[in-house]
Image (tube, coloured by chain):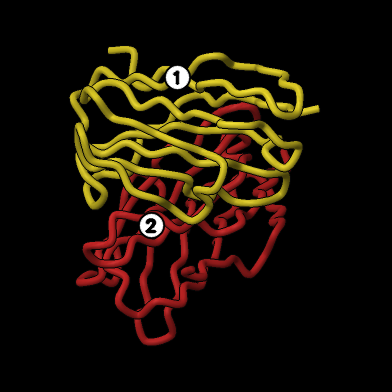
Chain colours: A yellow, B red
Amino acid sequence: NAGVTQTPKFQVLKTGQSMTLQCAQDMNHEYMSWYRQDPGMGLRLIHYSVGAGITDQGEVPNGYNVSRSTTEDFPLRLLSAAPSQTSVYFCASSYSSDQGGNTFGSGTRLTVV
Amino acid sequence: GESVGLHLPTLSVQEGDNSIINCAYSNSASDYFIWYKQESGKGPQFIIDIRSNMDKRQGQRVTVLLNKTVKHLSLQIAATQPGDSAVYFCAEIPYNFNKFYFGSGTKLNVKP
């Protein structure tokens, strides 16, 4: 098992550019989620999904879109990057939101200039 | 949003001592709590969880205590080792809400 795989590990974008952060898991987990982590802060939930075809907003969804066409993949799209989106992004998965905690990916460090 | 916070941003302990990391939460309806460990440059790693119908749960060298009366959660690490040095986060999941709310983290520094 590879666990949760995030790509890329690092990315620099110019303001206004769009991009997709990839996340894939091979554990057949139903629940997947995206977080951002800013310096000295905890993780904030961006979007989450309780299963294929179902997504919902977290605490800080503005400027981000997600889709869940398969159980394995949960990409995060930045529509028009802004410097405020400079952060480390983590994808996570679990069997459900209340079972056993999340397995996290290793993160994507995004810088928007 | 929900409020999950930590009392101490940095905790320094001597190797071999016990560590206690604290966390306060605001939603009395929260059903599920998790402690995570995050080492530098890595994603958070699940340590231990506890449900609201329990007061205490033990793992290997770790114990989580839940005090619902004062909405307080703590993580106890026995015989702290240098490998325990990391940032520790608590997370709160309100009942049937599907959303995790993380605290801001406590950095544990273990001195040899």
For this orientation, the residue located farthest to the right is A113
Q: Nearer the viewer, residue B63 or A95?
A: A95
Q: Residues within 10 Å of mark 2 (few under 14, many from 20)?
A: some
Q: Tag 2: residue type?
A: Thr
Q: Are marks 2 and 1 on the same chain?
A: no
Which residue was labeled with disc 2? B63
Q: Is residue A61 above or below residue B81?
A: below
Residue at 59% in and 16% down: A9
The mark found on residue B112 in the picture is: none
Where, by quadrant of the figure, is residue A55 drawn?
A: top left
Q: Is residue A91 visible?
A: yes
Residue beneath disc 1 = A22
Would you say B84 lies left or right of A83 here?
A: left
Identify residue type, mark 1: Gln
Instruction: Specify the quadrant of the image occupied by residue A71.
Output: top left
Residue A18 x/y as whole percent: 60, 23
SS at mark 2 in the image: strand
Q: Position of residue B36 (x, y in %)?
A: 46, 46
Do labels 2 and 1 touch, CB within 8 Å? Answer: no
Indicate left or right for A25 with B109 as reference.
left
Q: Residue at x 39, y 54 (%)?
A: B100
Q: Quadrant of the N terminus of chain A?
A: top left
Between residues B46 and B78, which one lies in front from this camera angle?
B46
- Residue at position x 24%, y 66% from top? B95
Residue at 39% x, 41% y: name it: B46
- Place of residue B73 in the rendered image (x, y in percent of width and height, measured from the top left): 44, 69
Subunit bearing disc 2: B
